[in-house]
Amino acid sequence: MKAIPENAAPILVVDDDTGLLTSIHAVLVGAGFPEPILLSDGTRALDLVKNHDIHLVLLDLMMPDIDGMEILKAVKSQCPQVECIVFTAVDDVETAIDAIRLGAYDYLVKGLNNEKLVITIHHALERYSLRQERTLLAQRQSFGDLKHPEAFQSLITRDDSMAVVFRQVEAVAPTEYSVLITGESGTGKEMLAKVIHQLSNRSAEPFLPVNMASFSGTLFEDEFFGHAKGAYTNAVSDKKGFLEEAQGGSLFLDEITELDLSLQGKLLRVIEEKELYRLGSTRLRNVDVRFIAATNRNIPGEIEAGHFRADLFYRLNTCTIHLPPLRERRADIMPLARHFLELHADRNGKKIHDFTPNLARRLEAYDYPGNVRELQNIIASAVLVETTDRLRTASVVTPLPVSDADETDAGDLLPLEDVERRHIRKVLDATQGDRAQAARILGINLSTVYRKIKRYGL
């Protein structure tokens, strides 16, 4: 059987069961989708995908003429933009994981209710459109292209690479997809997650950030699922978990790879089934939460090492946004530095208005392994010890790079007492406050160290 409608059809259904093809055709047309292409001969599927503007393939994995996995592999290899939903008569977790690993959007078991089929198709087509838009966004973008620039005001940036990130946020925010934000520690993943929430249809509901490294065992179940009164000795009243507290809103799962492997399956079930039981309760509760996850690790590597579930990754990884490290967006360094200078000078009641040229050069040359968070810490600590109206290199504890082009700023020339105070402070920081070790490094006795600490207020 092969049925191609006259008008362009974005959906192709491939199954050797012609009765099922007819049934799916009726469901799709009844739900308002364009009339699909129907095909019972799987060997011709790839040719149809290549020669028609196909957005989505619904594919049976068990066919007599060809293995559905081979069709899936060929489609995703030669037409990676096309979304695929696979279905089979057998509910097999291993097969589902293999299919999703090959690029399938979802895995459905035959006989499911029509409502779930329609919702899954709708989401797959939505992701196709989103991916097409993100492909366009990968081209050079500017901040002038933003539709909602006011939403990003808390994120200080001038680098063009962040304009691409912001446009990706605008594209994904209005959808219901789970989002995975990747990037090194200190790049601002939680701030970006807040913007996604603010631009979503859930903005009036809670945004709840949770650090996944903080939970293990029963604590995870109690904090995420809540408990019923009497569930255990100290459970004196009913308690909502994070999932219910974030109902209708967004739950931000920070450092998701830190969640213990034994607990990942419990989280996966909630994401898939959208329901939970509180500890000690037999009442099933619905969960309406959008999941936004973040990690500073390489998740495929964590999966390969057996530390992270592949199926959980595929559920969370509907859309990925990568935040580049600060060293790859150097145009942001001085705007951020000035922002932090103004912030911390104001907090400490100091009239420090600028940087010496030497310090500005060194700040721009530094690689910031701790990213934006490290830059803020550098500025904050320097403001505390600065005594002039400009922030100087001498006030910075972190060793910053020096080049032959560096010149000593007149403002960096310090009295000997200030040099001694700063050096003792650096040694104490390096020894984590071990005064005896600091005395050995400084070449002075311990009582002198105590006297200097008291004198300089260290």
Image: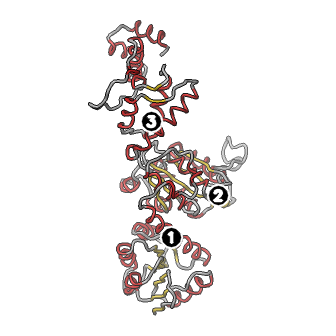
Q: Foreground mark, 3 or 2?
A: 3
What residue is disc 3 on? 375
Q: Position of residue 253 (x, y in %)?
A: 54, 50
Q: Position of residue 28 (x, y in %)?
A: 58, 82
What residue is disc 2 on? 202
| Helix, strand or loop at mark 1 | helix
- The kind of residue on which mark 3 rests is Leu
Q: Judge by depth and name the residue closer to the eye, 409 or 96.
A: 409
Q: CA distance from mark 1 to mark 2?
A: 21 Å
What residue is disc 1 on? 129
Image quadrant where residue 442 sits:
top left
Q: Position of residue 428 (x, y in %)?
A: 41, 19
For disc 2, the neighbor class at 10 Å (few under 14, some 14 to 19, many from 20) is many
- The kind of residue on which mark 1 rests is Ser
| Helix, strand or loop at mark 3 | helix
Q: Judge by depth and name the residue closer to the eye, 70 or 75.
A: 75
> Could you tell me if the residues under marks 1 and 2 are in contact, i.e. CB atoms within 8 Å?
no
N-term mark: 1 or 2: 1
Q: Is residue 81 above or below residue 425?
A: below
Q: CA distance from mark 1 to mark 3?
A: 38 Å
